[in-house]
Amino acid sequence: MFTGIVQGSAPVVAIDEKSNFRTHVVEMPTEMLPELALGASVAHNGCCLTVTEVNGNRVSF
């Protein structure tokens, strides 16, 4: 459950279509990356999503 304060914004750089779902890829500002880990909750357009992959500054949900 997301309980934090919104700390910034980041552009969606890809939406990957899967067979039964979509994966959103967001390019995060570098200052936000140290706090991110797999399984972390992040507010995404008002919805709490779970981090499924971190690849450099690109984070997938």
Image (cartoon, rainbow, N blue to C red):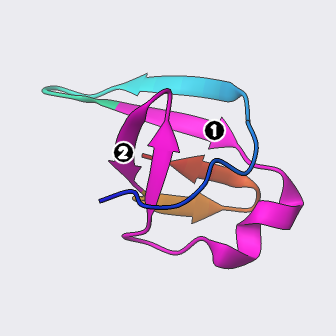
Q: Give the CA separation, mark 1 to mark 2.
A: 14 Å
Q: Is residue 47 left or right of residue 5?
A: left
How many numbered circles are shown?
A: 2
Q: Amino acid at mark 2?
A: Cys
Residues shaded magenta: 23-50
Whole-percent x and y of residue 59? 59, 52
Residue depicted at x 36% and y 47%: 49
Q: Which residue is mark 1?
A: 26
| Relative depth, front residue between 18 and 25 | 25
Q: Which of the marked residues, 1 or 2, is nearer the chain's N terminus?
A: 1
Label 2, residues with CA under 10 Å away: few <14, some 14-19, many ≥20: some
Q: Amino acid at mark 1?
A: Val
| Relative depth, front residue between 46 and 33 | 46
41 part of magenta stretch: yes
Name the residue at the left extreme: 20
Residue depicted at x 47% and y 33%: 24
Residue depicted at x 60% and y 55%: 5
Q: Quadrant of residue 40?
A: bottom left
Q: Quadrant of residue 16?
A: top left
Q: Is residue 27 left or right of residue 54?
A: right
Q: Which residue is mark 2?
A: 48
Q: Is residue 6 left or right of residue 27?
A: left
Q: Secondary structure at mark 2?
A: strand
61 part of magenta stretch: no
Whole-percent x and y of residue 8? 76, 43
Q: Is residue 12 above or below residue 36?
A: above
- Please give the label number shown on residue 14: none
Q: Is residue 40 left or right of residue 59?
A: left
Q: Is residue 20 above or below residue 23?
A: above
